[in-house]
Image: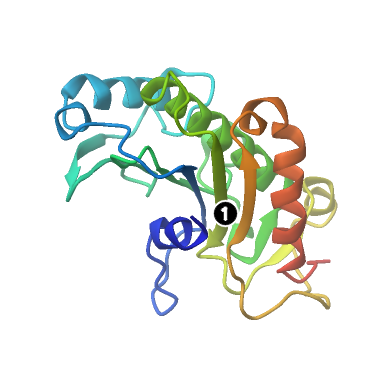
Amino acid sequence: MTARSIAMLEPENRNQVMAAMLDLVVIGGPRQRILRPAELEAPELAEQLEQSALYGGSRLFERTLGTANGLDGPDLVLRQERGAVIRVTEQGSVSLRVPLDEPRAGGRGFDPMSGMIIIEEAVQQRLGTTLEYAAGVLDLIDRTQRLTHLVVAARLSGVEHRGWRTRAQHASNASSVQMGNGGIRERPPIILAIRRAALGLDRTALIEDILVPLRRQFPIAS
Protein backbone atom coordinates (compact mmCIF):
# COMPACT_ATOMS: atom_id res chain seq x y z
CA MET A 1 0.00 0.00 0.00
CA THR A 2 2.90 2.35 0.68
CA ALA A 3 4.28 1.82 -2.83
CA ARG A 4 0.80 2.35 -4.32
CA SER A 5 0.36 5.61 -2.40
CA ILE A 6 3.69 7.00 -3.60
CA ALA A 7 2.94 5.96 -7.18
CA MET A 8 -0.37 7.85 -7.06
CA LEU A 9 1.17 11.19 -6.11
CA GLU A 10 0.84 13.74 -8.92
CA PRO A 11 4.03 14.05 -11.04
CA GLU A 12 6.60 16.59 -9.86
CA ASN A 13 9.08 18.21 -12.28
CA ARG A 14 11.87 19.94 -10.37
CA ASN A 15 13.37 21.30 -13.59
CA GLN A 16 10.25 23.35 -14.30
CA VAL A 17 8.83 26.29 -12.37
CA MET A 18 5.49 25.27 -10.91
CA ALA A 19 3.05 26.61 -8.34
CA ALA A 20 3.32 25.44 -4.75
CA MET A 21 1.03 22.48 -4.12
CA LEU A 22 0.00 20.08 -1.40
CA ASP A 23 -0.33 16.54 -2.72
CA LEU A 24 -2.24 14.02 -0.60
CA VAL A 25 -3.11 10.42 -1.41
CA VAL A 26 -5.31 8.00 0.55
CA ILE A 27 -5.06 4.29 -0.34
CA GLY A 28 -7.44 1.75 1.17
CA GLY A 29 -7.07 -1.91 2.01
CA PRO A 30 -7.59 -4.76 1.71
CA ARG A 31 -7.09 -4.16 -2.01
CA GLN A 32 -10.26 -4.79 -3.97
CA ARG A 33 -12.50 -3.18 -6.58
CA ILE A 34 -14.78 -0.62 -4.95
CA LEU A 35 -16.18 1.03 -8.08
CA ARG A 36 -17.23 -0.78 -11.24
CA PRO A 37 -16.07 0.88 -14.49
CA ALA A 38 -19.64 1.96 -15.26
CA GLU A 39 -19.94 3.58 -11.84
CA LEU A 40 -16.64 5.40 -12.23
CA GLU A 41 -17.57 6.93 -15.58
CA ALA A 42 -21.17 7.78 -14.59
CA PRO A 43 -21.76 11.56 -14.82
CA GLU A 44 -23.49 11.50 -11.43
CA LEU A 45 -20.25 10.59 -9.62
CA ALA A 46 -18.26 13.40 -11.25
CA GLU A 47 -21.08 15.82 -10.47
CA GLN A 48 -21.16 14.80 -6.80
CA LEU A 49 -17.38 15.12 -6.46
CA GLU A 50 -17.39 18.51 -8.19
CA GLN A 51 -20.28 19.86 -6.13
CA SER A 52 -18.54 18.82 -2.92
CA ALA A 53 -15.25 20.36 -4.07
CA LEU A 54 -16.97 23.65 -4.93
CA TYR A 55 -19.68 24.01 -2.30
CA GLY A 56 -19.09 21.41 0.42
CA GLY A 57 -17.62 21.91 3.85
CA SER A 58 -14.20 20.83 2.55
CA ARG A 59 -13.90 23.00 -0.56
CA LEU A 60 -10.93 22.12 -2.79
CA PHE A 61 -11.92 24.13 -5.87
CA GLU A 62 -12.40 27.86 -6.41
CA ARG A 63 -15.87 28.78 -7.60
CA THR A 64 -14.54 31.46 -9.97
CA LEU A 65 -12.44 29.00 -12.00
CA GLY A 66 -13.44 26.49 -14.63
CA THR A 67 -13.51 22.77 -13.88
CA ALA A 68 -13.03 19.84 -16.26
CA ASN A 69 -13.59 16.15 -15.61
CA GLY A 70 -13.08 12.92 -17.51
CA LEU A 71 -11.36 9.56 -17.50
CA ASP A 72 -7.57 9.31 -17.44
CA GLY A 73 -7.10 5.66 -18.28
CA PRO A 74 -9.29 3.83 -15.73
CA ASP A 75 -9.30 6.75 -13.26
CA LEU A 76 -11.83 9.56 -12.88
CA VAL A 77 -10.03 12.94 -12.77
CA LEU A 78 -11.35 16.45 -12.07
CA ARG A 79 -9.07 19.45 -12.69
CA GLN A 80 -9.09 23.20 -12.18
CA GLU A 81 -7.08 25.94 -13.90
CA ARG A 82 -4.81 26.74 -10.92
CA GLY A 83 -3.68 23.15 -10.71
CA ALA A 84 -6.12 21.56 -8.25
CA VAL A 85 -6.71 17.88 -9.08
CA ILE A 86 -9.02 15.15 -7.76
CA ARG A 87 -8.35 11.55 -8.86
CA VAL A 88 -10.43 8.50 -7.88
CA THR A 89 -9.65 4.91 -8.87
CA GLU A 90 -11.67 1.69 -9.12
CA GLN A 91 -9.94 0.47 -5.93
CA GLY A 92 -11.31 3.48 -4.02
CA SER A 93 -7.98 5.31 -3.87
CA VAL A 94 -8.14 9.10 -3.71
CA SER A 95 -5.40 11.48 -4.89
CA LEU A 96 -5.73 15.23 -4.28
CA ARG A 97 -3.63 18.23 -5.27
CA VAL A 98 -4.44 21.74 -4.02
CA PRO A 99 -2.64 25.11 -4.37
CA LEU A 100 -0.68 26.08 -1.28
CA ASP A 101 -0.14 29.83 -1.63
CA GLU A 102 -2.72 32.10 -0.05
CA PRO A 103 -4.38 35.01 -1.90
CA ARG A 104 -3.77 38.43 -0.38
CA ALA A 105 -6.50 40.07 1.65
CA GLY A 106 -9.20 41.52 -0.57
CA GLY A 107 -8.29 39.15 -3.39
CA ARG A 108 -5.63 41.48 -4.83
CA GLY A 109 -3.32 38.90 -6.34
CA PHE A 110 -0.80 36.96 -4.24
CA ASP A 111 1.71 37.85 -1.53
CA PRO A 112 4.92 38.82 -3.42
CA MET A 113 7.01 36.96 -0.81
CA SER A 114 4.99 33.78 -1.16
CA GLY A 115 7.50 32.35 -3.63
CA MET A 116 10.10 32.23 -0.85
CA ILE A 117 8.12 30.94 2.13
CA ILE A 118 5.73 28.24 3.28
CA ILE A 119 3.11 29.40 5.79
CA GLU A 120 2.56 26.71 8.42
CA GLU A 121 -1.11 27.53 8.99
CA ALA A 122 -1.78 27.32 5.23
CA VAL A 123 -0.34 23.80 5.14
CA GLN A 124 -2.32 22.89 8.26
CA GLN A 125 -5.57 24.21 6.79
CA ARG A 126 -5.09 22.44 3.46
CA LEU A 127 -4.23 19.18 5.20
CA GLY A 128 -7.49 19.45 7.11
CA THR A 129 -9.45 20.24 3.96
CA THR A 130 -7.96 17.44 1.88
CA LEU A 131 -8.30 14.83 4.63
CA GLU A 132 -11.93 15.82 5.19
CA TYR A 133 -12.64 15.69 1.46
CA ALA A 134 -10.96 12.28 1.13
CA ALA A 135 -13.05 10.97 4.03
CA GLY A 136 -16.19 12.23 2.29
CA VAL A 137 -15.22 10.51 -0.96
CA LEU A 138 -14.67 7.20 0.84
CA ASP A 139 -18.04 7.52 2.57
CA LEU A 140 -19.65 8.17 -0.82
CA ILE A 141 -18.09 5.32 -2.80
CA ASP A 142 -17.64 2.74 -0.02
CA ARG A 143 -20.66 3.13 2.25
CA THR A 144 -20.30 -0.39 3.68
CA GLN A 145 -16.65 0.27 4.64
CA ARG A 146 -15.07 -2.61 2.79
CA LEU A 147 -11.82 -0.64 3.03
CA THR A 148 -10.94 -0.96 6.73
CA HIS A 149 -7.42 0.47 6.89
CA LEU A 150 -5.63 3.22 5.00
CA VAL A 151 -2.25 4.56 4.02
CA VAL A 152 -1.95 8.35 3.74
CA ALA A 153 0.88 9.96 1.75
CA ALA A 154 1.51 13.72 1.75
CA ARG A 155 4.08 15.90 0.00
CA LEU A 156 4.70 19.56 -0.78
CA SER A 157 5.72 20.27 -4.38
CA GLY A 158 6.86 23.43 -6.15
CA VAL A 159 8.57 24.63 -2.94
CA GLU A 160 12.15 23.58 -3.69
CA HIS A 161 13.90 26.69 -2.32
CA ARG A 162 11.44 27.94 0.29
CA GLY A 163 11.72 28.43 4.03
CA TRP A 164 9.08 27.76 6.69
CA ARG A 165 7.24 30.41 8.73
CA THR A 166 4.17 30.73 10.87
CA ARG A 167 1.62 33.35 9.84
CA ALA A 168 2.56 35.51 12.84
CA GLN A 169 6.25 35.37 11.93
CA HIS A 170 5.47 36.40 8.38
CA ALA A 171 3.20 39.26 9.46
CA SER A 172 5.98 40.69 11.64
CA ASN A 173 8.57 40.58 8.83
CA ALA A 174 6.70 40.30 5.54
CA SER A 175 9.17 42.29 3.41
CA SER A 176 12.31 40.18 3.87
CA VAL A 177 13.34 36.56 4.23
CA GLN A 178 16.54 35.06 5.60
CA MET A 179 16.93 31.30 5.51
CA GLY A 180 18.10 29.67 8.70
CA ASN A 181 19.55 26.25 9.36
CA GLY A 182 17.68 22.99 9.10
CA GLY A 183 15.77 21.26 6.37
CA ILE A 184 16.88 18.43 4.12
CA ARG A 185 17.65 18.29 0.41
CA GLU A 186 15.68 15.12 -0.36
CA ARG A 187 12.09 15.45 0.82
CA PRO A 188 10.29 12.11 0.62
CA PRO A 189 6.52 11.93 1.13
CA ILE A 190 5.24 11.60 4.67
CA ILE A 191 3.60 8.16 4.94
CA LEU A 192 1.18 7.08 7.66
CA ALA A 193 -0.74 3.81 8.10
CA ILE A 194 -4.02 4.34 9.96
CA ARG A 195 -7.38 2.77 10.72
CA ARG A 196 -10.13 4.11 8.48
CA ALA A 197 -11.99 5.52 11.49
CA ALA A 198 -8.98 7.74 12.30
CA LEU A 199 -9.61 9.74 9.14
CA GLY A 200 -12.65 11.21 10.85
CA LEU A 201 -12.28 10.63 14.58
CA ASP A 202 -8.55 11.40 14.96
CA ARG A 203 -8.15 14.01 12.22
CA THR A 204 -6.54 16.66 14.42
CA ALA A 205 -3.81 14.26 15.51
CA LEU A 206 -3.44 13.01 11.94
CA ILE A 207 -2.91 16.56 10.65
CA GLU A 208 -0.23 17.13 13.29
CA ASP A 209 1.47 13.81 12.51
CA ILE A 210 1.85 14.95 8.89
CA LEU A 211 2.56 18.63 9.53
CA VAL A 212 5.46 18.22 11.95
CA PRO A 213 7.56 15.93 9.69
CA LEU A 214 6.81 18.22 6.72
CA ARG A 215 8.06 21.22 8.70
CA ARG A 216 11.32 19.43 9.51
CA GLN A 217 12.06 19.10 5.79
CA PHE A 218 12.47 22.87 5.34
CA PRO A 219 14.74 25.59 6.77
CA ILE A 220 13.19 28.14 9.10
CA ALA A 221 12.73 31.52 7.38
CA SER A 222 13.48 34.38 9.77
Q: Is residue 58 left or right of residue 137?
A: right
Amino acid type at image mark 1? Ala
Q: In this rendering, is residue 57 above or below 30? A: above
Q: In this rendering, is residue 118 above or below 187? A: above
Q: Quadrant of residue 88?
A: top left
Q: Is residue 66 left or right of residue 205?
A: left
Report the coloring of the rendering.
rainbow
Q: Label 1's element? A: strand
Percent position (x, y) of residue 202? 73, 31
Q: Quadrant of residue 181?
A: bottom right
Q: In this rendering, is residue 26 above or below 49? A: below
Percent position (x, y) of residue 197? 63, 28
Percent position (x, y) of residue 189? 58, 63
Q: Is residue 32 left or right of residue 156?
A: left
Using the image as rendered, state which of residue 31 and residue 172 is in the foreground.
31
- Residue shown at 64% from the left, 42% from the top: 194
- Residue shown at 39% from the left, 56% from the top: 8
- Residue shown at 19% from the left, 46% from the top: 74
Percent position (x, y) of residue 156? 56, 59
Residue ID for mark 1: 154
* Label total for image: 1
Q: Quadrant of the C terminus?
A: bottom right
- Residue shown at 74% from the left, 60% from the top: 213
